[in-house]
Amino acid sequence: MFQYQFLYTVPEFTDYWLSKYGKTVRVYILGETILTSDHHLIRDILIGPNSKNFTSRMGNNEGLQNIGMFNKGIIWNNDKKKWKTGRMAFDSNFTSEFLKKTEYISQEKILNEILKLNKSDKIKCVKNGHLNYQIDLMNFFRKITLSIVLEVCFGVSISDDDKDLIIKSIVDYFKAWEFFLLKSNLTSSIFFPNLHQIHNKAVANLNKNISNFIDKYLKDFEATPFLSSLKQSNFSDEEIQQNILEMILAGTDTSSVSLYYTILLLTENKSQYELLVESLHNDPNSRFIDFVLKEALRILPVGPVIIRQAVDDCKLDGDIKIKKGTNIIMHLARMNRDEEIFKNPLNFEPERFNSMENEKEKFFPMG
C-alpha cells in the first residue's frame, strides 16, 4: 500500500483500487478506509439521513499543519466550533442582494480582462508559416475569477502584478496540498526531501502573498459581509488570514478550472457548441447553458474525489456498518461515468439534464 498511498495522488490510487476490485473497496490509509464509486453509498453519505455524520475529513495532522489547514479555515478544519464560525462568514456573502451584485461585477470584470489582453498574455506560435498568438485560457479564466472574488468578497481591485503573484502561488499551493495531505513530516522529509522542500516553499509563498494582500489592500474590514463576519469572530490574526486565503483559493481555482473544462469539451463537440450559441441567441436566459455546465462538471469534475470521515458509528445503504473514525474516499469521476446511472456516460450530451429524473440523487459534481 505504501507505494500507492505516497507515490500517487489520492485520485490515482483510488482509481487503481476501484478498477482492480470493484465499486467499493476497504483498505488501510491513516486507519480503516473505504474507497467507493457506488452511487447509492455516495448518495447516503452526501444527502442521506446520516450525512451529518460525515462532516469531518481525513488527513494527516502534520500534513495539514504544513499547509495551514489543521484546525484553521473551513476547507479541512475538523474543529467543529471554528468550522461553523468560518462557515457562517463564508455564507454571509450568499444573500439574494449580494448575488445580484456578483452578477453585475462578473460582467464588468470579464469585460475588463478581455480589454486588457495584450501580447504578454498570449503565446507566440507559427502555423502555416504565419506568426499567430494563442491565449493561455486557463490563466485568463483565473484572472477573471480572482478579480470577481476580490471585488465581491473583499471590495477591492488589485494591480495586475499582484494578481499574477497570487495566481502563480495558488497553482503551486494546490500541488503542495496534494503532496502533504496524507503524509507525516517524517514520511515526506525522508522519502521525498526535495519535494518536501519545494512544497514547503510553495505554502510559505502563498501565505506571504496573502499577508501582503491584507496589509496593502484590506483597509476596511466592514467593506463586505465576509470581512465583517471575520472581524466579529474570535479568530486570531493567523486564523483570519487562513480564512481569507481559502476564500481566494476556492473562489479562484474551482471556478476557473470548471470554465476551462467546459470550453475544452465544447471545442471537442462542435454540434453542442453550435446548439449553445443558437439557444443563447434566441433566449439569453436559456437553460441550455446550465445543462452545458452540469454536463462538463459530470464528465470532468474539478475534484474527482471527495474525502470524509465518520464522526460516529452508523449504517449506510442498508447494512454497511461504518465505525467512528472510518475514512471514506468517494470517486465522483468514476460514479458520474457509470453506465447504470448515465446512458452513454463518456458522451458530452447536455440535453440529458433536460429530462433527468431525481437529478439531486444522481448528480454529484462536488461535495
Image (cartoon, rainbow, N blue to C red):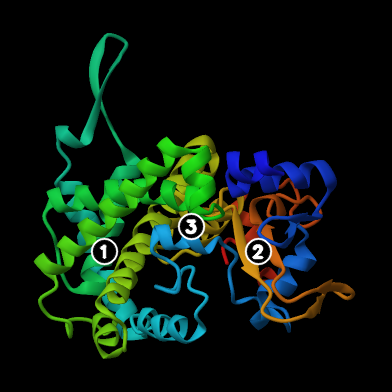
Residues packed near mark 2 inside 10 Å, few (<14), some (14 to 19) or many (20 plus): many
Location of mark 1 (residue):
148
Please report the residue visible at 54 percent of the width from the left and 55 percent of the height from the top: 303
Location of mark 2 (residue):
363
Give x and y (percent) for residue 245.
31, 65
Circle 1: element type: helix
Please report the residue visible at 69 percent of the width from the left and 64 percent of the height from the top: 328
Q: Amino acid at mark 1?
A: Ile
Task: Examine the rendered structure and indicate whether residue 262 appears above or below residue 207.
Answer: above
Question: Do tag 1 and tag 2 residues touch (Cβ < 8 Å)?
Answer: no
Location of mark 3 (residue):
63
Give x and y (percent) for residue 164.
21, 47
**Residue 346 visible in image:** no
Circle 2: element type: loop
Mark closer to the observer (2, 3):
3
The C terminus, quarter of image: bottom right
Please report the residue visible at 20 percent of the width from the left and 37 percent of the height from the top: 121
Inter-mark Cα distance, 3 to 1: 31 Å
Quadrant housing residue 150: bottom left
Q: Amino acid at mark 3?
A: Gly
Give x and y (percent) for residue 46.
66, 73
Question: 160 and 14: which one is in front?
Answer: 14
> Residue 51: which numbered mark, if any?
none
Quadrant housing residue 86: bottom left
Residues packed near mark 1 inside 10 Å, few (<14), some (14 to 19) or many (20 plus): many
Question: Do tag 3 and tag 1 residues touch (Cβ < 8 Å)?
Answer: no
Please report the residue visible at 63 percent of the width from the left and 68 percent of the height from the top: 308
Residue 237 horizontal side relative to residue 72, left or right: left
